[in-house]
Image (tube, rainbow, N blue to C red):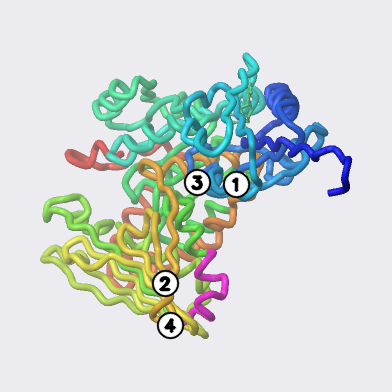
Amino acid sequence: MKRGAAVEKKMTKVITYGTFDLFHEGHYRLLQRAKALGDYLIVGVTTETYDRARGKLNVVDSLTTRIENVRKTGFVDEVIVEETQGQKFNDIKKYDIDIFTVGSDWTGCFDYLKDFCEVIYLERTKNISSTILREQKQHIQRIGIIGTGRIADRFVLEAKLVSGVSVEGVYNPHTESALRFANKWEINVYENREEFYTAVDAVYVASPHETHYGYVKSALEHGKHVLCEKPMVLRKKQAEELMRCAKEHKLILFEGIKTAYCPGFHKLLGIACSGVIGSIRNVEACFTKLESENSRELTNHIYGGSFIELGSYVMLPILKIFGKEYEDIRFETIKNEKGLDIFTKISLRYPDGIATATCGLGVKSEGRLLISGTKGYLVAEAPWWKTTYFEVYYEDQERVDKYSEIFLGDGLRYEISDFLSMINGNHNNEFKLTRGESAALAEIMEQFMLAEGREEQLSERMENHGNMGTQGMQPKVSGEYADCL
Ligand code: CTP
């Protein structure tokens, strides 16, 4: 330092974080005041993956748009991306931060940072938020449920956590079950299917398998978007027909395999296909869940059995990694006395790899997903279908890479949120389960039915249920299955 020069004052560095979706006055005022607290303002903008992982679903603007909007204010000296929980602490050290600030809706939440810098909660601007804007901008999609089984209960609970949708009502030809369900969740019950369709924008089909095709078709023909439980249908031709129908009517048709939409599963696929384990040569996926001998899953002589119940999950990583163009597929089953598969192994051969999918309702096994490549392998233990953790191993035994991701609640919220964003015209998530993959799954189910000799019975049942939409037929299901309808 030259003699006589003024001692240089350390610049005060301020940091703040947010999603900044649908940029509004509250954001602007916060950034303005944050800048005024010091000389240099850094803003951490959250990634979509981080937002989804922490349960903030339905962010409308892309990360680039949100960053651009933050920059446009002119208050910001540097923008960084917030990707993970715990990043704030590291950023404060890394950027030598003096003040951490955030809106008063977070009061108290960041007091733990007081040991490292000053923490200031700025008063939040009243009556404005991204949530309010999202709700004003987007019409709330009213969802109607067909079927009142266990999965429908979980759907209602999870749908409550996704902003932009409301469960409007339920339809089940078995009035008693419908009433019970409607009372439990305080939603409307419709005895007449036409009235039901008039009251909703989208339909969630959670009825027994044999009724899926008829209900999906009829809902699409009534101009409704459809989210259908897996397996959507058990025939490729039907899957393609329904997809075509959805396309013609400009509607969204989604198959509800929740794993496909869960953040951890995406991370896993991303890492597996990133080249870190080299070229993938083998995929093994196993899912077993013991069911009682008298359960619907182990007694329905056409739609029961392990593969119909769990096949969509175990086939998913295989189709995502190796694609639909397998050269050979084989099924091996162990059956119960009713002739239903209690344990099934599916072996697939691809030009550059092999795959095995195993599922069981009457035999327990180690449920894991193993992806082997030319440089290493990736393992996710059960319940990998709700992926929260996986590890990558290499030839060098000293090296193990560990990855984790949050999975909230039952996971259906991710599927519902993607369904909603598609309805709202955002097709960024379409790749998670493509129409082609859904059709491939239906084709594999069909081949399984053929191999099991259930094809003929299936055809008969299909004829009974296929025209429900146009002729108003009701599926003939009685007693214990009525709730599922
Ligand atoms: N903020 C504010 N006043 C508002 C809204 C937000 O001061 N009316 C502040 C928040 O406290 C936070 C920053 O702006 O410090 C970014 O908030 P963000 O969560 O992105 O915005 P919200 O409008 O609160 O979003 P959401 O409704 O999705 O929670």
Q: Is residue 1 visible?
A: yes
Residue at which label 4 appears: 396
**Marks 3, 1: nearer the viewer:** 1
Mark 4 residue CB less than 8 A from any atom of ligand 1: no
Q: How many marks?
A: 4
Q: Amino acid at mark 4?
A: Asp
76 to 27, vertically: above or below: below
Residue 400: mark in rendering? 2
Is residue 478 rendered magenta in the image? no
Q: Secondary structure at mark 4?
A: loop
* Whether label 1 touches label 4, CB < 8 Å: no
The residue under the point 76% across, 34% down is 39
Residue at which label 3 appears: 86
Query: Which of pointers 3 and 2 lies earlier in the amino acid sequence?
Result: 3
How many C-alpha atoms fall within 10 Å of the one at disc 2: few (<14), some, or many (≥20)?
A: few
Q: Is residue 418 visible?
A: no
Q: Nearer the viewer, residue 386 or 363?
A: 386
373 left or right of 171? right
Q: Secondary structure at mark 2?
A: strand
